[in-house]
Structures are given as structure tokens and as C-alpha cells.
Amino acid sequence: MPTIKDVANLAGLSVATVSRAMNGTGYVSEKAREKIHQAINELNYSPNEVARSLYQKKSKLIGLLLPDISNPFFPLVAKGVEDFLQKKGYQVILGNIQEDNEKANEYLRAFEQNNVAGILSAVENKNRTQSNIPTVVLDRIDQDVEYGVYSDDLQGGELAAEAILKGDPKKVVVIAGPESVTRARDRLLSVEYTLKKAQVPYALVKSTSFLLEDATLTAKQVFLEHPTVDSVIAPSDTHAIAIMQEAYHHGVKIPEQLQVIGYDDIPISKLVVPRLTTIHQPAYQVGYKGAEMLFALINDQFIEQKKIILPVHLEERETVRNGGTPIE
């Protein structure tokens, strides 16, 4: 397999010059770029898109970093990203880190080596690139983020709690999302504030991730520690569906004996029986608008709003009691 040293030798240039050209980290003359371009093609050193970006001085590659593609929320985000960027002639390189910090760093290095024009990142702050590559953050937000698109978690937490309160809850369990995710913490704070304002007591059960395996274990923990629970506020639809499955195994009827509300409104939430009441997050729009913002950033266009907060809404279906359906 050819190396960067082979490219440098064939082009008659130093490894440092080739590296600068490929990473866009310094000045490289037009003549040198053409030599590198020819050497890359001859050696088949890297994808054609990288060679083409060297020749054109502008990459058409975008890196998309996602925490876990098995979470049904993120394919919707990715579709929004791809739909916008394809119209603009860009290709997307997907990095699925599977909640692994080291894998995130490896993908970021790969993005830089492939001379991406920009990065869309849906991972926490410690796993974002420190380079000068234009970056827009999706579905993750904190004070360090300059450009980002996310949905309104404070509104979402309040809507979820209010929906449960309408069902006359007697024993509420709130499942907290991972503490490492800022938006999950904001959502939890809003749920707790709304319940406390209504003077409704609740128990808290912590979940360490949004992975299906963890959601399943958390559901078992809820029924083990709180066997008389009659209302569950879940941090994701995956957690809510895991609760519904566990309720089925315990012979608990939904929503008569147990009301459940999810978060995200993933496609499967409409297909489970009973259909899941949930908070709709505009996942597709998060991806689409994030890509739109990154395109403007890459092309030095004016960006009126650097942080976009998208509204959420309640999807009323069949897992929450309306007006206090009697508990059997």
C-alpha cells in the first residue's frame, strides 16, 4: 500500500509539503499541487475526491460524526445532512463512534487527512476537532459551541411532564438520560421543575446511555425498584419502548395501569402497540439546517443566527391517560 512518503518521492517534494497540501494547513504552490495530484493518481494513494480537492484547491467532502447510528434518531439527522449537501455537490464521510471516545478521535484524524471542507459533529465537546476546519455542532450544545443546531429541551421536558400530569399520576418514575450529555441534563431539569411546581413526587432512575442495551437494563431496574410505578417519563423513545416491553412481561396494562411518554418521535413509535405518546424532535431539520449553516460557513457567507433552537411538540397517541383514566 503506498504511503505519503511514496507520494512525496514521486512528486519530487518533501513529505511536509505533501502533508500541508493534503491537510490544507499551509501554503503550497500551484505547481507543487499539480505534482502531488499526479502522484496521488498514479499511486492510487487516496480517494479520487481528495486528489480532486487538491487540484481544485477546495474539497467537496464533509465529515459527519455521530455518537451511535443504531439510535434511530441519528439516521434521520444524517438524511437531513445528506439531502442538503448532495444538492450542493458535496459528499459525506460518516463517522459512527459508538459512544467510544478513542474512535471519535480516530475519525477526526481521518477527516483531517481526507482534507474535508467541514465537519458536522453530534458528539460531546471533548471529541470535537481542535483544528481550523469549519465545524457545526448538531444536537449537542454547550457554552463552547459557536455554531450549532438543536431542539428546545426545556420546552420538551415541560411538555412531557405536563402530559403525564394530565393522567392523574400516583407514583412517577423519571428516567434520567446520560449525565455526560448536556441536553439530557437540561431536559431532566425541566421535567423536575414542572413536577415540583405541580407538587407531584417522583423517583429518579439513572441511565448511562441511549443504547438499546442500556435502555433494556434500565427498564428492568425501574420495575425491580418501583413495582407500583404508574407513570414513566423516559429520556428517549428507545427507553419508553423498553418500559412498554417490560410492562408486558409483568402483565401491566398501558395506559390504564401504567402511562409512558417517550422523547424523539422515531418512526417505530407509531408502530408499537399501543402507539407511543412522545415528544417530537425535528431530527431531519436538525441535520438539514446544520448542513445549511456549514455550507454558509465554508463559503464565507453571512450567518444571521449562529445557534438555532428548533421547537418541539407533543405527539398524543395511546400510552398516556387523558383526564385521569382510572387505574385498575
Image (cartoon, rainbow, N blue to C red):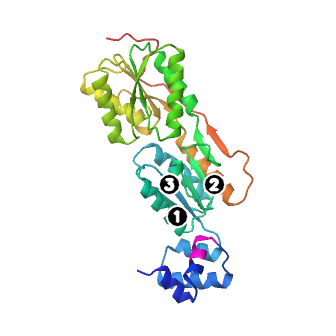
- Tell me: residue 298, above or below residue 265: below
The answer to whether residue 24 is magenta is yes
Q: Which residue is mark 1?
A: 111
Which mark is first along the chain, 3 or 2? 3
The crowding category of the residue bearing disc 3, from other C-alpha atoms within 10 Å (few below 14, some 14 to 19, many at least 20), is: many
* Residue at 48% over, 51% down: 66
Give the alpha-carbon distance from disc 1 to disc 2, as whole Å: 15 Å
Pointer 3 with pointer 1, Cβ within 8 A: yes
Q: Which residue is mark 3?
A: 65
* Image location (x, y in percent) of residue 307: 65, 43
Give the camera-side residue of 90 and 196: 196
Amino acid bearing label 2:
Leu
Q: Which residues are magenta?
A: 19-25
Label of residue 238 in the image: none
Q: Secondary structure at mark 3?
A: strand
Q: Secondary structure at mark 1?
A: helix
Give the alpha-carbon distance from disc 2 to disc 3, as whole Å: 14 Å
Amino acid bearing label 1:
Phe
* Residue at 50% over, 64% down: 109
Q: Secondary structure at mark 2?
A: helix
* Image location (x, y in percent) of residue 132: 63, 62
Amino acid bearing label 3:
Leu
The crowding category of the residue bearing disc 2, from other C-alpha atoms within 10 Å (few below 14, some 14 to 19, many at least 20), is: many
- Tell me: residue 208, above or below residue 114: above
Q: Quadrant of the N terminus?
A: bottom left
* Residue at 63% over, 58% down: 134
The answer to whether residue 192 is magenta is no
Instruction: Place residue 322 in its image quadrant.
Output: top left
